[in-house]
Amino acid sequence: MKYAVGIDVGGTNTRVALINEKYEIKERVQFGSDPKDPMKTLNQINDVIKEFGQEIEGIGISCPGPLDLINGVILTPPNLPGWHNFVLTKELEKITGVSVQLENDANLAGLAEAVIGAGKGKKIIEFLTISTGVGAGLCIDGKIYRGAKGFAQEVANCILWKNGPSQGDLKKGSIESIASGTAITKRANDAGLEAAHAGEVYQLAQEGNETAAAIMEDAYEYLSSFIATLYGILDPELFVLSGSVALKIPGFIEEIEKLVQAGRPVLVGTTSVEISEMLSKMLTMRKIEHSVLNAKLHQKEAEIVAKAGFSCAVTIATNMAGRGTDIKLSPEVKAAGGLAIIGTERHESRRVDRQLRGRAGRQGDPGSSVFFVSLEDDLMRLFSSDRIASVMDKLGFQEGEMIEHKMISNSIERAQKKVEENNFGIRKRLLEYDDVMNKQRTVVYTKRRHALMGERIGMDIVNMIWDRCANAIENNDYEGCQMELLQTLAMETPFTEEEFRNEKKDTLAEKTFNIAMENFKRKTERLAQIANPVIKQVYENQGHMYENILIPITDGKRMYNISCNLKAAYESESKEVVKAFEKSILLHVIDEAWKENLRELDELKHSVQNASYEQKDPLLIYKLESVTLFDAMVNKINNQTISILMRGQIPVQEAPADEQQPRRVEVRQAAPEQRQDMSKYREQKQDLSDPNQQAAASQDTREQQKREPIRAEKTVGRNDPCPCGSGKKYKNCHGQNA
């Protein structure tokens, strides 16, 4: 029989075991470790090995990390301060004369579970120990996973708490500085408590000591978050939790354990599949057998539902799935109290909660239901959860304390009712939202029709110029007025700062308007003057060849190609070019601004829905905000249109001084469209023998163009309410000049 020695060196104790080749422990000895003198501990190990009296093939030794596994060096374990940077393997080999292999203690514990323990045959096993320190080990396919440099699973310095507690060489806020036995004891002693180990701190917390309870609560909170993180990253088949530190996750898990011990089946309702899976992992840690009912396990759905009514059965399902299950109870279960319904949180809909609760009363069956509520739930966060939390703190309620009162249930039902009413209101108000948009659409399309058909386009532009002049003077100081007139109307301020302060705004606006109109008239005349010689030359020489002509016009930023009827331009002495320019620019600006406004209205429609939770009418807020958006759109249209029109000009290249005769304008016809050569394709099949096929081949199968009915566009009546929402009649508002 061959023998080996396994050694576990911890911050508190050292364990030495004699193991045969069948993995059986024949002898075991334990003694206290010396955290300051490693050689003293190694000599004790050698004495124990000699007492075994067997020939040893090799020694395997485990130590808390971090470790240099390649060179056999203990680096900086916080619970062994005198062992830092100690070359363990070489020193132990010198003393014993036997080959030594160093390994992380958590890695070896995980390997034991994978080879001879509960993880035998499983692919991924995670081992986590919370004792004097915190260590982790990972085994994949029965082998220890060490990582690229041997430092995998060195989790002690994982930071969870910014500027949190510190311990030795560990970083502030690391998991070992928060949740290890050493850290818990140190924090308690620093706070003035007398505790020799973490168990005493836990006992003080159970007796009502607030300081000890806060320390243990920190350990519970951050450790559970850490475990959940490991689960999310690794997704192991088996998670082994070990160590002497007492762990307790309060809440519904304990309730489930009580009900299972009573022999009752349990149906746990959750609000999402993610919560179901997380709860499943928590129950697995507590070694509570259960089934999960969700879409991922639809093949086992019938089997899960059939067993859900058995004694001690635990079934996890979302509220939506759980309310539809038909759970049949045996006579033994009915005698034990029936089905127990546990909800992890309240659903937004009362109907869903009632249907889930109704599973416990199927056809007169006995049962009970309880819903756990947290102030962090989505439903509760909508209704001043911070204020409620502060009230509960003032009343002295502890974390995790169960509060059962009809007032709380009624408050939750009122919250659910508000959510339901809001959801119904969203659907009910859709048409009213669209009605606001339609009213704005009527005004915009009227402006667009005026531009498209040429109706009142001149009057619209005059109104825009007046509006820009009045707005620049009324809504700005002198410097702002100067800047706006220069940016929009491309003109200097026609009055001094003293006149701006002393004279009436209407007088200044009228003065500015008259000068702006003179500039605009001069611009348009200049534009027609430049275009007319070209139009005249093209029409007289090549008028039979062209119907329309493109005139390039620029505002200094962008070039616009304006299409104009050649004959109309010639007969009007190029005044038609100016009209076409105004029409094109106005249409372009209106279309771009309207598309942007529609996007903003759609975003507004979604953003105002939560106003109901503030006791406000979302529709009213939508109408008020939509008016603001509409005014901003109209202002943008006016600014951009006038800015382009006041700066528009035809680019002209000045002729040399010695050139006396006007140059001939070269006009070329656009290149004809490239057509594919169809000569190589046959237009009909030559070998059609069937008379029916011949008839089909000769038939014209081209789709006939459908005639669309002429629809009269809806217009606003003079006595109808103005679409802008002012409440005035159209003839007294935007229709004054119609």
Image: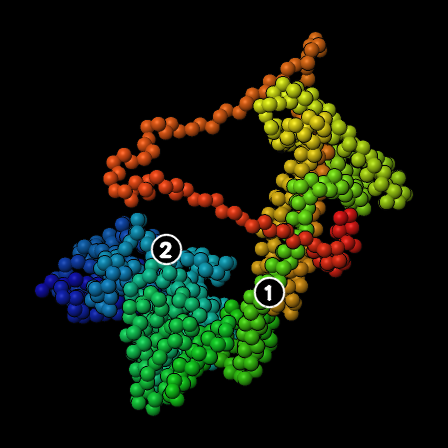
Say left or right for 20 vs 199.
left
Return the disc, 1 or 2, that comes first in the chain's sequence. Answer: 2
Residue 129 in the image, given as x and y percentages of width and height? 34, 66
Other residues around mark 1 within 10 Å, as few (<14) / some (14–19) / many (≥20): some
Q: Count the marks.
A: 2
Say left or right for 338 vs 394.
left
Residue found at x 34% / y 71%: 292
Residue found at x 29% / y 36%: 685
Viewer can see residue 480? no
Instruction: Tell me the SS state at disc 1.
Output: loop
What residue is shown with label 1? 429
User: Quick one: 34 or 504, which is closer to the camera?
Assistant: 504
Residue 109 in the image, given as x and y percentages of width and height? 27, 64
Question: Is the residue 164 above or below the residue 30 in the image?
Answer: above
Report which quarter residue 411 is drawn in.
Answer: bottom right
Residue found at x 21% / y 54%: 94
What residue is shown with label 2? 76
Viewer can see residue 666? yes
User: Quick one: 76 or 699, which is closer to the camera?
Assistant: 699
Residue found at x 44% / y 65%: 222
Instruction: Tell me the SS state at disc 2.
Output: loop
Residue 122 in the image, given as x and y percentages of width and height? 24, 63
Q: Which three-letter amino acid code belongs to the residue tagged 1?
A: Arg
Residue 260 in the image, given as x and y percentages of width and height? 34, 82
Rendered image coloring scheme: rainbow
Instruction: Give the CA distance from mark 1 to mark 2.
Output: 66 Å
Question: Dots 1 and 2: beta carbons under 8 Å?
Answer: no
Report which quarter residue 15 is drawn in.
Answer: bottom left
Circle number at residue 539: none
User: Quick one: 233 or 557, which is closer to the camera?
Assistant: 557
Q: Residue furthest top?
A: 658
Q: Residue furthest front?
A: 691
